[in-house]
Amino acid sequence: MPVEVTWWGHATCTIEESGTRLVTDPLFARRLAHLRRRQGEVPPPEAAVADAALVSHLHADHLHVPSLARLVPGTRLIVPAGATRTVPGLARLGLPVTEVRPGDTVDIGALRVRAVPARHDGRRLPLGPHRSPALGYVVEGGARTYFAGDTGLFEGMAEAVGPVDVALLPVGGWGPRLGQGHLDAGRAAEALASLGALSAVPVHYGTYWPIGMDAVRPHEFHAPGEAFVRHAARLAPKATVHRLGHGESVRLEARP
């Protein structure tokens, strides 16, 4: 069965396969603290329709409680272990919550979701103890789709993630500099080559930008997607990169 991926902006994607629909790191806001949505419209109501939401870590642009509140009733939340203790607003949503650690699996409809490690600060910032791990997820059905969340390259990444057909990889951020625990376009291409996925979708770029920075090096806002295409062509020539616009979808097949 093919998997259909829709990118709504930032790290928010819909993954649909075999009649089961998942949404990653839902962020349906026009503004978030000092960030403004500069590209694409706020996702439409259909983006909030899912059997489950996969939350990679506790940063507010990935675990955004007001956006989770827009999910249809009954949507299952898959979150890092310790999230409900650290973010009390999760319990007030009235949605079923499952906490996971790397290696845990959860069956959702026809799909199995496996939590995998990520190299990233998983705390609820700006303050908070380090109670929750940052995660990626591998969605296993007819195809195996890897949603990386936020991560840097780390030793043993390919072994931890396992074989995948489709990789949804962060290639940028929301400012001109990326700290540790992030993939830029070049490192994302290295990750793609290591993982061996034959299809990739770049995410986590070109959506939110800090106030007042629109006229400051604006190419850095758009450049990561194009740069990832170039780097992937050199480092992972067997892979096809699908650079989607906001709200665009692609149907992808598993490898034979």
Image (spheres, rainbow, N blue to C red):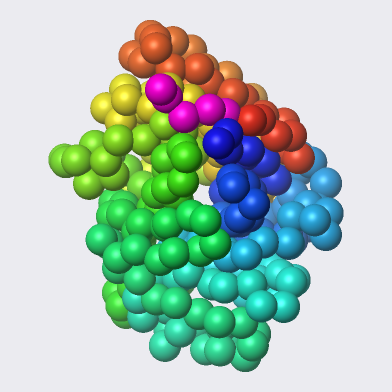
Q: Where, by quadrant of the figure, is residue 233 drawn?
A: top left
Using residue 202 as the reference point, say whether residue 70 is left or right of it: right
Q: Nearer the viewer, residue 84 or 220?
A: 84
Place of residue 138 in the rendered image (x, y in percent of width and height, measured from the top left): 40, 49
With respect to residue 14, does 158 lie above or below?
Answer: above
With respect to residue 234, does 195 lie above or below?
Answer: below
Q: Nearer the viewer, residue 212 or 105?
A: 105
Which image quadrant: the C terminus? top left
Place of residue 63 in the rendered image (x, y in percent of width and height, measured from the top left): 54, 67
Q: Where, by quadrant of the figure, is residue 81 drawn?
A: bottom left
Highlighted range, magenta: 252-256
Residue at 42% across, 88% down: 85
Place of residue 72 in the rendered image (x, y in percent of width and height, measured from the top left): 74, 72
Q: Main secondary structure of the magenta part?
A: loop
With respect to residue 139, does 39 lie above or below?
Answer: above
Res. 144 in view: yes
Using residue 97 as the reference point, say whether residue 123 is left or right of it: left
Q: Is residue 57 magenta?
A: no
Res. 157 in view: no
Q: Where, by quadrant of the figure, is residue 191 drawn?
A: top left
With respect to residue 72, does 238 lie above or below?
Answer: above
Residue at 62% across, 64% down: 51
Which image quadrant: the N terminus? top right
Residue at 27% across, 41% down: 162
Residue at 52% across, 56% down: 110
Place of residue 32 in the rendered image (x, y in percent of width and height, measured from the top left): 68, 62
Residue lying at the far left in this picture: please name it. Answer: 155
